[in-house]
């Protein structure tokens, strides 16, 4: 779904990993209500402290609950580009999503950047449970981070993986496609996507996303070669995929516009 007052901004998948010493949470959700509900749920399964909150990227449905985790003393971890991205877009996110989800849900939300940054790779030890964090080059955004729990071979992919819900492009189409093989090579057996059913088999979960982006790139390249104007190209690019995705009509033209801007300079 799109974020709304009805769903309280809770549209993305969050993760919790419990070690013998501490707990890590992957993404904080789209509102303080969601974040506090997650914190309460953790308290029912473990008395260990939530030591880390890991933000997989900058989008509001993944970071709007950060203040709740700061309040309980968690260290916020993110991609080295995330502080800059949040500084650039934070005020806009608060303004635009106030209109989308309403004043009551926006109240108390703060744009809080990470204080522990991942330049390339970083390990977090929760006590008998080591999480492997990896920073990626521009793809979904320019601040994508994945989390691999080697003990269970579970990959928390953030929005580098969408299943059933149309992938959204806010970084680089070419970068996403170029890194798809490296992403697929992670030795997980299951994945928690940013959006879609949980869990999903890995790397089979990438099949639909890869197909969509390859078709989108093909259609945009043809439009550019044929001299089709942007305003016309974005209405047909990727159209053959409409029946395969939720929210296709909400996001495909935006994806096509971003793809056109990138591919016309190949």
Image (tube, rainbow, N blue to C red):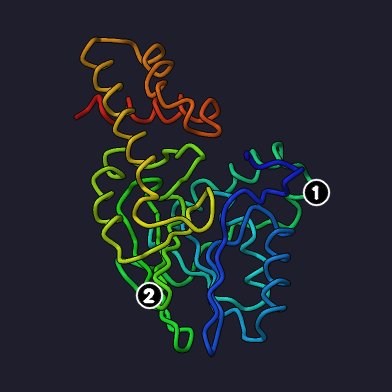
Q: CA distance from mark 2 to mark 1?
A: 39 Å
The residue under the point 38% across, 24% down is 238
Corner quadrant of residue 92: top right
Q: Does residue 52 lie above or below 252 as drawn?
A: below
Q: Does residue 6 lie above or below 50 as drawn?
A: above
Looking at the picture, how far across and down is residue 8, in whole percent?
A: 73, 49
Closer to us: 88 or 154: 154
Closer to us: 174 or 95: 174
Corner quadrant of residue 63: bottom right
Closer to us: 198 or 111: 198
Is 90 placed left or right of 232 in the picture? right
From the image, tell me which residue sits under label 1. Answer: 104
Q: Does residue 104 lie above or below 248 as drawn?
A: below
Tag on residue 180? none
Mark 2 Cα within 10 Å, few/some/many (few <14, many 20+)?
some
The residue under the point 35% across, 65% down is 188
Q: Secondary structure at mark 2?
A: loop
Furthest-right residue in view? Answer: 104
From the image, tell me which residue sits under label 2. Answer: 150
Corner quadrant of residue 69: bottom right
Q: Does residue 233 lie above or below 200 as drawn?
A: above
Is 144 placed left or right of 186 in the picture? right
- The answer to whether residue 83 is seen in the rendering is no
The residue under the point 39% across, 11% down is 232
């Amino acid at each position: 779904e799109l974020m709304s007052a009805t769903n309280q901004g809770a549209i993305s998948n969050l993760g919790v990993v419990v070690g013998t010493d501490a707990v890590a949470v992957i993404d904080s959700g789209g509102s303080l209500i969601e974040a506090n509900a997650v914190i309460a749920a953790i308290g029912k399964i473990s008395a260990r402290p939530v030591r880390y909150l890991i933000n997989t990227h900058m989008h509001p449905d993944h970071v709007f609950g950060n203040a709740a985790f700061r309040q309980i003393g968690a260290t916020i971890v993110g991609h080295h580009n995330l502080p800059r991205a949040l500084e650039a877009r934070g005020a806009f996110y608060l303004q635009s999503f106030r209109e989308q989800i309403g004043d009551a849900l926006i109240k108390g939300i703060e744009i809080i950047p990470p204080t522990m940054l991942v330049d390339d790779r970083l390990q977090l030890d929760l006590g008998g449970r080591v999480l492997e964090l990896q920073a990626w080059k521009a793809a979904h955004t320019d601040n994508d981070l994945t989390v691999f729990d080697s003990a269970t071979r579970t990959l928390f992919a953030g929005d580098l993986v969408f299943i059933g819900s149309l992938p959204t492009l806010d970084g680089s189409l070419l970068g996403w496609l170029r890194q798809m093989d490296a992403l697929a090579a992670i030795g997980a057996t299951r994945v928690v996507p940013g959006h879609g059913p949980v869990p999903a088999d890995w790397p089979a979960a990438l099949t639909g996303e890869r197909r969509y982006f390859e078709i989108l790139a093909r259609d945009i390249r043809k439009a550019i070669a044929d001299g089709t104007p942007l305003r016309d190209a974005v209405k047909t690019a990727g159209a053959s995929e409409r029946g395969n995705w939720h929210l296709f009509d909400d996001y495909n033209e935006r994806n096509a516009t971003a793809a056109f801007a990138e591919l016309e300079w190949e």
